[in-house]
Image: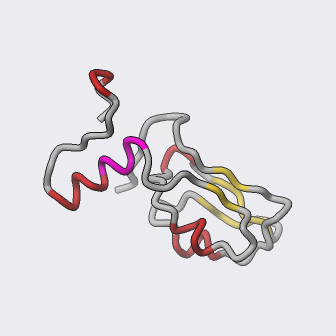
Amino acid sequence: MKHKYLENVATLSLDAEKCTGCGMCTEVCPHAVFDISEEKAYIVDKDSCMECGACVMNCPAGAIEVDAGTGCAAAIIYGWFTGSEPECGCGDSGCC
């Protein structure tokens, strides 16, 4: 099952100019956010990004940025690991 998070809130960005097309992002991303075409990575589905930071830590070219551990995705993951309800600090907006 592919998880989706809130639309248009992920902090993920990719600098195609820096990308060497090594494919590490496609290997480490748990939600298949990236793919490779014409020897460059591209973002397939930004809304599936859970902002874990695996892509950033494994990109040798420094082409990827994400504010890892922020927002509702981090709260959802924390809830999975602890068995608790997600709490992201959104207040009464109901995002989680």
**Numbered range of the magenta stretch:** 71-76
Can you give x and y, in whole percent of width and height, for residue 74 in the image? 37, 51
Quarter residue 41 falls in: bottom right
Q: Does 63 sit left or right of 25 as displayed?
A: right
Residue placed most toward the observer, 7 or 35:
7
Q: Does 74 sit left or right of 60 as displayed?
A: left
Q: Residue at x 57, y 67 (%)?
A: 55
Quarter residue 30 falls in: bottom left
Q: Residue at x 22, y 52 (%)?
A: 79
Q: Is residue 31 above or below residue 11?
A: below
Please identify the quadrant where the N terminus is shown. Answer: bottom left
Can you give x and y, in whole percent of width and height, for residue 82 in the image? 17, 58
Main secondary-structure element of the magenta-colored stretch:
helix
Q: Report the label total.
A: 0
Q: Residue at x 71, y 57 (%)?
A: 42
Q: Residue furthest left?
A: 83
Q: Is residue 60 above or below residue 48?
A: below
Residue placed most toward the observer, 7 or 12:
12
Q: Does 38 sit left or right of 76 as displayed?
A: right
Q: Residue furthest top?
A: 92
Can you give x and y, in whole percent of width and height, for residue 63 in the image? 73, 63
Q: Is residue 40 above or below residue 6?
A: below
Can you give x and y, in whole percent of width and height, for residue 44 in the image? 62, 53
Q: Does 49 sit left or right of 39 as displayed?
A: left
Residue 73 colored in magenta in the image = yes
